[in-house]
Amino acid sequence: MPQENKKRGRRMKRKLEEDGESAAAPDASKRHKPSDGHDGDVNFMPLGGQDDSLDAAYPHGDRPFFGMLDADEQEYFKRADEMLELNSFGDQEERDLFLANVYREAEGKELKIAMSQSCSRLMERLIQLSSAAQMKKLFAAFSGNFIHLISHRFASHCCEALFLRAAPVVSAEMVAPAPKVSKDADEIYVSMENLFLHTLAELEGSVGFLMTDQYGSHALRVLLLVLSGDALDSQATTQILQSKRKEDVRVQGKEQTEDGSKTRSVPKSFGDALEKLLADSVAGLDTDKLRGLSTHPNGNPTLQLLLKLELTHFGKQRAKDETSIIRTLLPDDPITAESGSAAYINGLIYDPVGSHLVEQIVQHTPGKMFKSLNKEYFKERLAALARNEIAGYVACRVLERMSKDDLYEAHEALIPAIPSLLERNRTLALRTLIERCAVREIDTQAIAAELDRLLSDGNGFDVKKLLKLEGAAITNGTNGTTNGNRNGTPHDSVQSNASEDAAYFSRPSQPAKVHFNLLAQAMLRVPGPLSSLILDSIIDLQPSQLQQMVKDPIICRTIQAIILSKNGSIIQKRKLVQHFYGNIGHMAVDKSASHVVDCIWDGTHGLAFIRERIAEELAENEGEIRESQHGRAVWKNWKMDLYKRRRGDWIKQSKEKASNDGFQSFAELDRVKKEGGGSVTEVGTGTPKTALQLARERHARGREEKTRREKRGMTGAGNGPGTGSNSTATAATAIASG
């Protein structure tokens, strides 16, 4: 029985057969070749119901035993690992000296360290900090044993780290080749390119075994990416390279020397090696055997990468080659609903492992083949696929690949399915549809109308239901009523409406809440009715409800998107921010709400007086804010020290960064004068004044004239409170707040 798959778990101690060694290394015995021909790893997962030839036996010969570190050596390397993990060195020179000492102690013991459970992490951290010369020494130390190291439980992590760290060196040597003559007469210069090619030569003949090996498959994927020159640290490649359980071994505070999210230039020899590796990986596998890899937990990610590299690096014409991977998987031309290829796709699309391969096929297959698949299989099933938890991801890839005409038809097919999608919390396909409609310039009015019908009550669209605030319920929209109210009171139990597709959520699950908030953020990015639904609804909420939202770690991100939305008008943003008045101090010290306060600075573009109002409230709560870690971050981002010391400079910077010289602070109203000749400009700047500013000036002059008449004893009809200099700011505030 396969045991639980653990992350570098406890080693199993065994004794090897009598072969001249008194005791066996725990690491060696752990992967000792059993009699059934499979690699003897306790976590090995055989192919259930698949051809045994897919899992090739380990290469001839038992895994060699390289010895064990003694107690003193293990203690030294453990202490070195702790120091490297903390990275608490005075300067770069001190760290380089420490690395040199560790390399000197590890000389001749590299294989022991790499295959040691307790010290393999040290090797990974050493590689992350190593220079090109030190990495070349590691290549030399591992040379001749890469097949054993790559398929080892602990050493495979070291090989992956070495390949990833050495890949940029190949590109750097292409730009500035190192001198062929070394300072040491006994040392022979070898380029990093040749070291990779020598490593590939060692693996020749074992690629089929590595494709399905639990540890070797990961290192093989890294090698494929290195040869291709693709980005090593992008989100798409990271998901293929490693599992979610992979331990993150890193050095604290390590500076990033290269950008792993960009493509790299690679020598021509790498392209030839990649083509040979692609051919060797599927050599001797017919359609049935290659399809067997589609649901293999280790073979599937490798097959995904092979398929992607074949179609992106060797052209779409490669699909016409009878020996290509895509043609071997989908041999039917054209693909029809009754063909074997369609049946194969149908079997994979609902499989948790195989569906990932279908995504790659949809994304990278040639246009002619995709149109055939879409017409014969996806087009009529798109709504059903979108409702499924697994197939919904494939439906998203299909929507991303569609032309404008096909996307419009999909738009018409998915609108009737929106109620069931929301009921099942399947918002991913709907979000992708909205994003693609915005790109293809397809009107989203129908989507907005359906969402308005489903998420409305007697007062109109209820954004609380969309954001999954506790107490909000989703109805079928037939009568616009629901047992949930608008004051945020949570339901005690899940209730049902007369309609079967009504769904209520008293305490929505976190994944569902995240997906609905991502849907709302996608709606905000689309100008027109979709964003208006949220913007118009959010400003109608009570301040207490908004406070509940901004302190929610998930919903607060949507509130930030609303404040920063380019589709929101100045009036909508002003009304929203005014709901926060009186609570800014409490928001600034909250972990989630503090980010909303930070966004108000950028979101109040053109509203300099709003910024000053927020700054005044922050200054009033200075003591509480300075005692909080999150509050101190808000204080710094709002430049409150400058506000307290030189308020005029703060106001000037606030207006300049808002690109809005027309709005002035209240203290500056008394200094505004009207220029002669009918030209109305701000004194000293020549900037034309806005209508709102002119209205403020007229109001201020009227109040001043009224005050002068009162002082002269001329009684007017408007006597009462609100005169004098303080009333000027009060009146301006009244105008600004509408």
Image (tube, grey):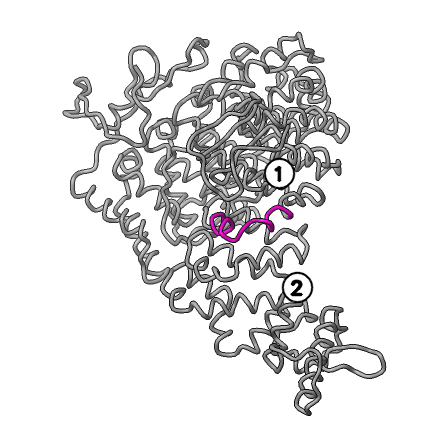
Magenta residues, as a range?
A: 536-549
- 180 or 78: nearer the viewer: 78
At label 2, counting other C-alpha atoms closer than 10 Å, the crowd grade (few under 14, some 14-19, many 20 or more) is: many
Q: Secondary structure at mark 1?
A: loop
- 19 or 460: nearer the viewer: 460
Q: Amino acid at mark 1?
A: Gly
Picture coordinates of residue 585, whole percent (x, y): 45, 62
Residue 537 located within the stretch drawn in magenta: yes
Looking at the image, is mark 1 or mark 2 earlier in the sequence? Answer: 1
Q: Amino acid at mark 2?
A: Gly
Q: Identify the residue at horizontal 45%, vertical 70% (top origin).
A: 620
Magenta residues, dominant SS class: helix
Q: Quadrant of the C terminus?
A: bottom right
Picture coordinates of residue 726, whole percent (x, y): 59, 79
Q: Is residue 116 visible?
A: yes
Quarter of the image where one finds residue 78: top left
Q: Identify the residue at horizontal 48%, vertical 17% (top origin).
A: 295
Q: Secondary structure at mark 2?
A: loop
Q: Quadrant of the N terminus?
A: top left
Which residue is labeled 1 in the image?
A: 458
Q: Is residue 84 left or right of residue 176?
A: left
Q: Identify the residue at horizontal 46%, vertical 41% (top origin).
A: 489
Q: Is residue 79 left or right of residue 124?
A: left
Picture coordinates of residue 281, whole percent (x, y): 51, 21
- The answer to whether 735 is drawn above or below residue 567 in the figure is below
Furthest toward the right, the residue is 677
Numbered-mark total: 2
Q: Identify the residue at horizontal 35%, vertical 19% (top origin).
A: 44
Which residue is labeled 2 in the image?
A: 606
Please identify, in this view, whether the residue under mark 1 or under mark 2 is nearer the observer. 1
Quarter of the image where one finds residue 263: top right
Q: Is residue 339 left or right of residue 249?
A: right
